[in-house]
Amino acid sequence: MGSGKCMTLLTLLAVLGMVMVDKVGSQNYGDALSKCILFFEGQRSGKLPSNQRMIWRKDSALRDGSDLDMDLLGGYYDAGDNVKFNFPMAFSTTMLAWSVIEFGQFMGPDLQHALDSIRWGADYLLKSTDLPGKVTAAVGNPIADHNCWERPEDMDTPRTSYVVNQTHPGSEVSAETAAALAASSLVFKSAHHRYSILLVNRAKEVFEFADKFRGNYKDSVGQGVCPFYCDWGSYSYMDELTWGAAWLFKVTKEQKYWDYVQNNIPNLPRRVIRLVNGDLQAAKTFAEFGWDTKDAGINVLLSGLVMNSTSAEPYVPQADRFVCSVLPESPYKSVTYSPGGLLFKPGGSNMQHAIALSFLLLVYAQYLKKHDGSVNCGTFVAAPSRLEQIAKGQVDYILGKNPLGMSYMVGFSQKFPKRIHHRASSLPSIGAHPRHIKCKDGSPYYETLKPNPNLLTGAIIGGPDIKDQFLDNRTNAGESEPTTYINAPLAGILAYFKAFP
Ligand SMILES: *[C@@H]1O[C@H](CO)[C@@H](O)[C@H](O)[C@H]1NC(C)=O
Ligand SMILES: *[C@@H]1O[C@H](CO)[C@@H](O)[C@H](O)[C@H]1NC(C)=O
Ligand SMILES: *[C@@H]1O[C@H](CO)[C@@H](O)[C@H](O)[C@H]1NC(C)=O
């Protein structure tokens, strides 16, 4: 009896819950797209332009590069701190550009903002590569920076510039920079032709430098970038070199870049090594795509160029293999899904994986559709619509269709993270509190349970744990910190679902 009544109540609650979740599910992808792109304005470093929309942020880091007599103003802070890490910044720029290349036609009025965001990255990457034989790897001493809870506008930690060169190379950061410049050149090809030419010419030079002077930047500027954005493992730059060549081939169609990819694709590292809770762990690269692993991205990108041609191998079979490593019903699945359906890979900041892998699924689905293709995973065949469905499921989860009914995008929907791990967002703005707040004087703002005073609209954070739980705790950076490489591929996905909800 008692348990029967309890069941009824539970059923009722479940139904109510479903109603709520469904309501959150009727999302406005267009609104999310606008916010997703707006987020990049909150990450801007340097002198802000007059059309800056996120106005609680002000000019910062106006002397960057001066330690080496360089102009390194501009660019993006990578996440919730105030360091400019070029490697993930370049990857974010590449992914924003790829978002526009595939889905810019669906962005409507947000296309211009997306272009501005790409240019903000590309302009800085041009400055970073202005001196032949040198590529900037980072600006800002990361240990000193992380030791403070300080607004970017107040920064007084050493803004050391870390630069790789011929004797101290860094092929991963250099090749990713080349990829970003090449991808950006394609974006600006028709509208800003001269800028586009400048970008592609620089991309070629930087790629040549990256290839000719090979090395891992951890051995050249270690302290400036490790352990934060280290590409661990030997030859771990081979995927960035191949990715850079793939982008240069897509943009220029020059045979030498094609040959480069063909010659090197068999030699890509088979394993990616990354920090998981302070320990180095290895994972197979074919099911990975992110700032340190380009394998799946290379295969998907090139599949779009060679599908149904005699050059389809190994790219199309490898892209298929990637898809079969992600689909939940696949016998080759190598990712995990939470009970609520969010894709998981080990390590913090999980949304980067859920979104980057969804982006590849969605892009590959478009290529397959163009060629009447599908993916054979052994026990079943996946149509492109299945790939799109998985990508949509991830985005819907992120925007609120999840067990907590929580949007993981700041400022989107009714319930979203209020205590994100982000210095500028959690400290009072310069407008509200003009007086300098010193390094350790920011600690109370870090520790408080109060919501952040400044909305970093559009920021997607690391996200819930594998049981779909989320405590909205500022001190848990793995769950509550936003990054530029989480948002960059999401822009493309949202544009697509805005057009095809
Ligand atoms: C090359 O880079 C290293 C590491 O950043 C630096 O110590 C060295 O001075 C640089 N050499 C030249 C010639 O710039
Ligand atoms: C093109 O290639 C895909 C992927 O290998 C295949 O599934 C599809 O049937 C091919 N389409 C045509 C028109 O041959
Ligand atoms: C937030 O997380 C930290 C550990 O990261 C923990 O010590 C603290 O108790 C948590 N606070 C809340 C309110 O959950």
Image: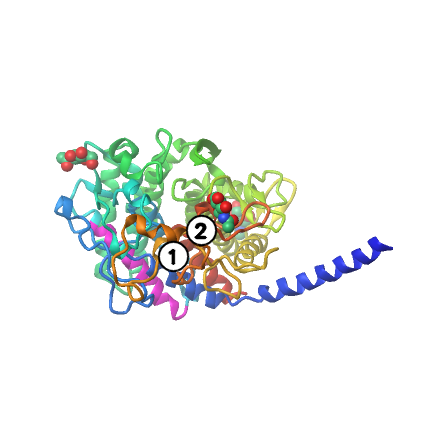
Q: Give the vertical position of 137 relative to 442 (above or below).
A: above
Q: Position of residue 288 (x, y in %)?
A: 47, 41
Magenta stretch: residue 117 in it?
Answer: yes
Q: Give percent across and percent down for residue 213.
A: 23, 33
The kind of residue on which mark 1 rests is Ser
Q: CA distance from mark 1 to mark 2?
A: 9 Å
Q: Place residue 221 in its image quadrant.
A: top left
Q: What are the residue bounds of the magenta stretch?
A: 108-127
Q: Residue at x 21, y 48 (%)?
A: 128
Residue hosting label 1: 426
Mark number for residue 137? Answer: none
**Relative to 416, is 425 on the left or the right?**
left
134 in relation to 470, above or below = above
Tell me residue 203's x, y (percent): 25, 48
On the image, numbered disc 2 is attached to which residue?
A: 474
**Res 154 quadrant in image:** bottom left
User: Can residue 79 be seen in the rendering of this structure?
Assistant: no
Q: In what quadrant of the picture does the N terminus appear?
A: bottom right
Query: Is residue 369 in the magenta section?
Result: no
Residue drawn at x 59%, y 63% as measured from the top left: 25
Query: For the stretch drawn in magenta, what is the main secondary structure?
Result: helix
Q: Secondary structure at mark 1?
A: helix
Residue 336 location, x and y as percent? Answer: 57, 42
Q: Say if disc 2 is inside 8 Å of ligand 3.
A: yes
Residue type, mark 2 in image: Arg
Whether the residue under disc 1 has CB within 8 Å of ligand 3: no
Q: Nearer the viewer, residue 245 or 181?
A: 181
Residue that extends furthest to the top in the rendered view of this protein: 234
